Image (cartoon, rainbow, N blue to C red):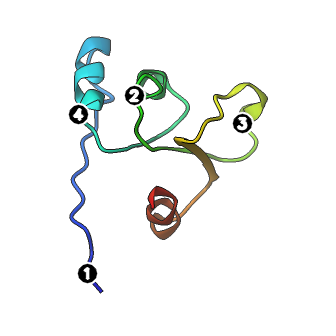
Amino acid sequence: EMVASVKALDCTDLTFLEMADCISGAKAFIGLLSAPLTIAHGFDIPKIVIFDGHSWDPAHVIRDKFTKYLVNPDVEQVLEALK
């Protein structure tokens, strides 16, 4: 089985504008409910949002064809969600 090459970049220490530039060139976003996710919602890329299932109310999140919310996923579940 062929495994796709994955390149990850942590944008959390960047300024808001630097994050926007970083995310604008991304093929996908994997992260938490956060400012970077807010920026990622401006782009039509897959978004995987990881959370613990009880620390925040998901009733107010953006629900669209690009965004999936996963409770405590492992790496395989995240990669599967990106397909």
Check disc 1 and report the residue beneath it: 2
Q: Secondary structure at mark 1?
A: loop
Q: Earlier in the sequence, mark 4 or mark 1?
A: 1
Q: Earlier in the sequence, mark 2 or mark 1?
A: 1
Q: CA distance from mark 3 to mark 2?
A: 26 Å
Q: Does the CB distance between marks 1 and 3 fall below 8 Å? A: no
Check disc 3 and report the residue beneath it: 55
Q: Residue at x 30, y 86 (%)?
A: 1
What's the residue type where badge 2 is placed?
Phe
What's the residue type where badge 1 is placed?
Met
Mark 3 Cα shell of 10 Å, populated few (<14), some (14-19), many (≥20): few
Q: Residue at x 67, y 28 (%)?
A: 61
Check disc 2 and report the residue beneath it: 43
Q: CA distance from mark 4 to mark 2?
A: 9 Å
What's the residue type where badge 4 is placed?
Gly
| Relative vertical location of residue 67 with respect to residue 20 in this rendering, above or below | below
Q: Secondary structure at mark 4?
A: loop
Q: Closest to the observer: 47 or 73?
A: 47
Mark 4 Cα shell of 10 Å, populated few (<14), some (14-19), many (≥20): few
What's the residue type where badge 3 is placed?
Ser
Mark 4 or 3: in front is 4
User: How far from the left and from the top, in percent, is residue 67?
Assistant: 55, 41
Name the quadrant containing residue 39. Answer: top left
Left or right: 78 as drawn, with respect to 14:
right
Left or right: 65 as drawn, with respect to 61:
left
Name the quadrant containing residue 2. Answer: bottom left
Which label number is shown at residue 25?
A: 4
User: How far from the left and from the top, in percent, is residue 59?
Assistant: 78, 30
Q: Secondary structure at mark 2?
A: loop
| Number of numbered tags placed on the structure image | 4
